[in-house]
Image (cartoon, helix red, strand yellow):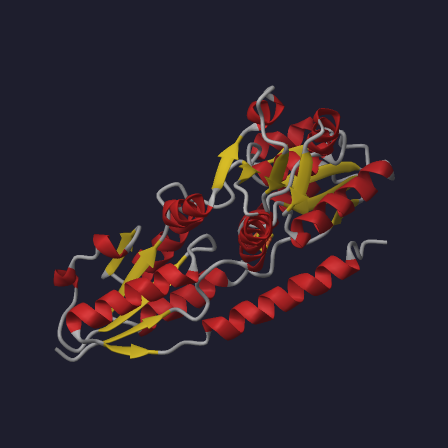
Amino acid sequence: MSMKVLVDPRAGFCGGVRRVVKMAEKVMSDTGLPLVSLGDIIHNEVEISRLERSGLSSTDHSGMAAPDGPRQVLIRAHGEPPETYAKAKELGVELIDGTCPVVTRSQNIARKHYEAGAQVVIIGKPYHPETIGIKGHCDNEAFVVYERDDVKQLDPKKKVFVLAQTTVAKEWFEERIGWIKEYANDVEVQVENTLCRFVVGRDRDLEQFAKQVDVILMVGGTKSSNTKALYGVCKRMNDRAHLIVEENDIDFSWFRDGDTIGVTGSASTPHWLLEKVRDVIGEKTGAGILRDTADWEARQQEQELAEMEKDDCDCE
Ligand code: SF4
């Protein structure tokens, strides 16, 4: 059969997830000891299993506080509220902070506006760990707007400052800004676009990729909402889209002679897994492997995050 297979050049970990995974691996390799994270550091079971084999496990807040709890804990990219840092200090637990610099920036911006007396509104999912973390940085006094009625919590006479959970869709964010402005139309509503630019535009790029190939495989974890959302994008653009967790889920009857097969993933799918899926297809079908530019993309993101860490917060 004459087929080709390639990995989507925009697929693979976002910069923040790549950074925290590397951090975990470095700590375990430097100390030679296992490490515990506060919550799963990534929504991908294949990558979690790989990290578990290196010694990473996870716990929750009560596990951290248990008498036989860990002495060292890794904070994941979503970040944590200040209470977590205070609790760890009280318990004598050393924290390794893997909070994504993009999220740290949102926390700092929210706190600054809260301290200046504005009503802070986070447009996002109320129970998402990142939202909980940002809210905590405003003494848990920030409001979360998810549904239309949520705007009714606001005082329509008091200045409003709005920011976004970093990973929500731009259109979804803008629709809610409209609701807030309509409700608090007598006061100043200041908006800061805190959407993560590593994920903004991902839908549009994926639409292009899904149209360019004959068959598309979305590789991602069963608990990842980003995987489900991006699979929806693939399916909309290409009838021959399939969702898999790993290479063993591939059904080779999906492929036909002459096909170009695209392999893609969400922000929590490791690049090595995408390459593995690509290589297995190449081995089993004889499909020619088209090389991609993802490594370049990854280096670029890492550099940008490192710059952001130096800047800390540019909201002054
Ligand atoms: S803010 Fe962006 S780069 Fe950071 S973890 Fe979230 S998606 Fe990844």
Above or below for 70 versus 31: above
Residue 160 visible to the viewer: yes
Q: Position of residue 305 (x, y in %)?
A: 66, 61
39 left or right of 307 in image: left
In front here: 290 or 57?
Answer: 57
Nearer to me, 135 or 279: 279
Q: Is residue 87 above or below residue 262?
A: above
- Picture coordinates of residue 113 (x, y %)? 81, 42
Which image quarter is the C terminus in?
Answer: bottom right
Number of numbered callouts drawn: 0
The spot of residue 24 in percent (x, y) is 56, 49
Q: Residue furthest front?
A: 32
Residue 261, placed above or below residue 131: below
Image coordinates of residue 199 in percent, x first then y, are: 53, 58
Query: Where is residue 242, by image quadrant?
Result: bottom left
Residue situated in front as seen by the camera: 190 or 241: 241
Location of the N terminus (image quadrant): bottom left
Considering every residue shown, the one lying at the far top of the view is 67
Residue at figure coordinates x 80%, y 57% from the top left: 314
Q: Residue 282's image quarter?
A: bottom left
Q: In terms of depth relative to the viewer, which is nearer, 161 or 80? A: 80
Residue at 54% over, 57% down? 18
Quadrant in which residue 8 is drawn: bottom left
Residue at 48% from the left image edge and 38% from the top image edge: 57
**Please, is residue 41 above or below residue 298 in the view?**
above
Residue 187 visible in the current orientation: no
